[in-house]
Image (spheres, coloured by chain):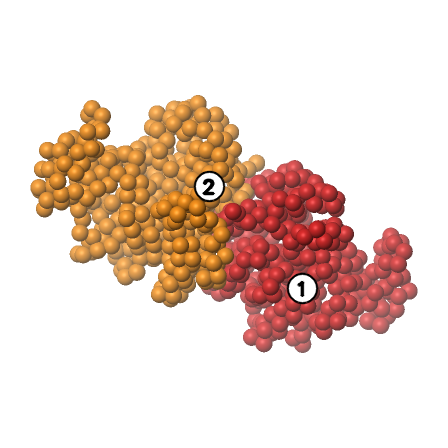
Chain colours: A orange, B red
Amino acid sequence: MALRVGVVGGGQLARMMIAPAVELGIDIRVLAEDEGMSAQLAATEVGDYRDLDTVRRFAADVDVVTFDHEHVPQDVLRALVAEGVAVHPGPDALRFAQDKLDMRARLAELGAPQPDWARVAGPDELQAFLDAHGGRGVVKTPRGGYDGKGVRVVSRADEAADWFAGLDEGDALLAEELVPFVRELAQQIARRPNGESVAYPVVETVQRDGVCAEVTAPAPGVDAAQAAEAERIGREIADGLGVTGMFAVELFQTADGRILVNELAMRPHNSGHWSQDGAVTGQFEQHLRAVADLPLGGAAPIAPWSVMVNVLGGPADAGMLDRVPAALAASPRAKVHTYGKAPRPGRKVGHVNVSGAELDAVRADARAAAAAFD
Amino acid sequence: MALRVGVVGGGQLARMMIAPAVELGIDIRVLAEDEGMSAQLAATEVGDYRDLDTVRRFAADVDVVTFDHEHVPQDVLRALVAEGVAVHPGPDALRFAQDKLDMRARLAELGAPQPDWARVAGPDELQAFLDAHGGRGVVKTPRGGYDGKGVRVVSRADEAADWFAGLDEGDALLAEELVPFVRELAQQIARRPNGESVAYPVVETVQRDGVCAEVTAPAPGVDAAQAAEAERIGREIADGLGVTGMFAVELFQTADGRILVNELAMRPHNSGHWSQDGAVTGQFEQHLRAVADLPLGGAAPIAPWSVMVNVLGGPADAGMLDRVPAALAASPRAKVHTYGKAPRPGRKVGHVNVSGAELDAVRADARAAAAAFD
């Protein structure tokens, strides 16, 4: 009997679980938000993931529930768990990916290295934080942000006035020190329900306008001690939060070599897409194995270097798929991944992976193939 | 607009095209023989591939028609081509994979090295062939054989009496010299409609009871001249027959180092499964790219060695999928591929790929993971 894994959410992360699910013989079923989404091929239901009855009905026909995103409400998740449904990652872990204030407080308890931060309930508290940190800082909405949304660099509290005005009674924003980082890294960990985990090599990520643009694996110039430190941070947080499935920690590296935790993701993450073609076990296969409590696969790279370049949407009428031939022609080692989404400017619609022995050539090939979509 | 590739036949080869199709954004549609076949996820129609109306209806909604097997009748294929359907490989090529007498005659015209052979219309002609070749030989039914079926090693003509009795008027059997081979090799070529082709490294195959059991890529101990010879043979036949898509040439290697053509396959082939995890471009992705006339991908190995071990069905009530965890536990680098087929003794139900630097360890890991299914 095939293992049935139910994925809530029909985006590209669910879509990219389809390929490994077919090979492993996992019956993957997707609760999609709409018809025609990225994971349409495996969509068995369309419905609202915020509605308990919808999610409960979907969960009744699967062995484990997992996610394309972190937005399923806590009350829905907790009701499923109370009814005996296997949910991975579970609500106790997911809340720290859903609320950045909860995350910062819990990371502090765990002793994880992170930027200075504060819970700011109003403009005065934010201004005090800014004044104490050189007059600038980052302000974030604790919930619902992604790809740079919900994040602002500010030097005056009134730059967040609209966000404060929109807060419910008792809520607050998150203020963070503006870390003078020299680059961003990311650490991927896969963790089973029994606590077994494997760590991928730490990678370097490059963001543009708050959106991940390019990833190099492993991160160039990271020494063994730094790599071990990133892995230790990743494992300690995964263990401390009880994460199951793929887990990504976005990190700042500072000029003095320190590593600080920026964000967490409890799902396959853009910074791990390189592993589809560049590691023994891609993160989508690994996520399925972890949430289904199957033995984890190796996370070693299959080549000295892998580079992932995102493809962002252009004008709304551009046919991304019409450009796949040009992307494939750009390099015989370009691995093209499409998301089946209508292009919109700036929207992630696919990515290209290239692996090989020479970093400069690998990066050039990946960029050339991705540029063919422009 | 997504390219629509229609695959006639719902077996494991069609199934293994699904994963790369999803990633490349190809809309893969399968005409399956029955409900619940290996490629069920992509099955858009169920019907008889020998029926022109069924295949014509299926072909009407796709951009190119290709195959999971070589059994679609010539008259059906030719009718489609006459109606303007893109069919890859086309009937002019496929006839040489459908009829072994036609194949032997055409290979002789092309000058390809092959065993001595003869068209034998009756027992007397077969006996004469055997007498001229040391009293033993191989007799084959020209059509319909696979995995050792339709092939017998005989030392007396009456051992093929039943096959002769079943021949239609004017038909014949194929007699072949029993080649004293030291091992079997296979050469994979991918070829586009425009004639562009790429060659995979020649591999070693091990058969048990006429069924492929294990493949090592590249073939150990093959020197550069032999590898070039295998590639040359593969390309010349692919070009000579006008093959499109993946093409496999099964080869005998003799004690004196000669290479002789045994069989041809015009589709992804068991001897190329290693490439799914062991080459820059797996043969299923490559087949889609070739038949859809997309730029071909690199065929270089991603590791010094890859080994593929087939998983054959055990007792009919054995649940193959229940043993996937044991197979994954056998080695963190085991890549498990399941076919979604009910196990029957001796039936191919899956395979395991392992890639790495040390052949002995790679082979041991692949065998251990495959053995977990026994």
Percent of width and height locating residue A360: 35, 65
Q: Nearer the viewer, residue B170 or B64?
A: B64
- The residue shown at (63%, 38%) is B36
Percent of width and height locating residue B151: 77, 58
Picture disc at residue B160: none
- Give the left or right position of residue A347, taking residue B303 as reference: left
Crowding at mark 2 (Cα within 10 Å: few <14, some 14-19, many 20+): many
Q: Which SS class for mark 1? A: loop
Percent of width and height locating residue B43: 61, 41
- The residue shown at (76%, 61%) is B100
- The residue shown at (30%, 35%) is A144
- Residue A47 drawn above or below residue A228: above
Q: Are marks 2 and 1 on the same chain?
A: no
Q: Nearer the viewer, residue A60 or A205?
A: A205
Picture disc at residue B242: 1
Q: Name the subunit of mark 2.
A: A
Of the residues shown, which amino acid type is indicated by label 2?
A: Ser
Please identify the quarter of the rendering in which residue B130 is found: bottom right
Percent of width and height locating residue B112: 70, 72
Crowding at mark 1 (Cα within 10 Å: few <14, some 14-19, many 20+): many
Q: Does residue B117 appear in the picture of this structure?
A: yes
Quadrant including the N terminus of chain A: top right
Q: Which SS class for mark 2? A: loop
Of the residues shown, which amino acid type is indicated by label 1?
A: Gly
- Give the left or right position of residue A61, taking residue A49 as reference: right
Q: Does residue A289 appear in the picture of this structure?
A: no
- Residue B232 drawn above or below residue A250: below
- The residue shown at (62%, 40%) is B44
Q: Which residue is mark 2?
A: A38
Quadrant including the C terminus of chain A: bottom left
Q: Name the subunit of mark 1.
A: B
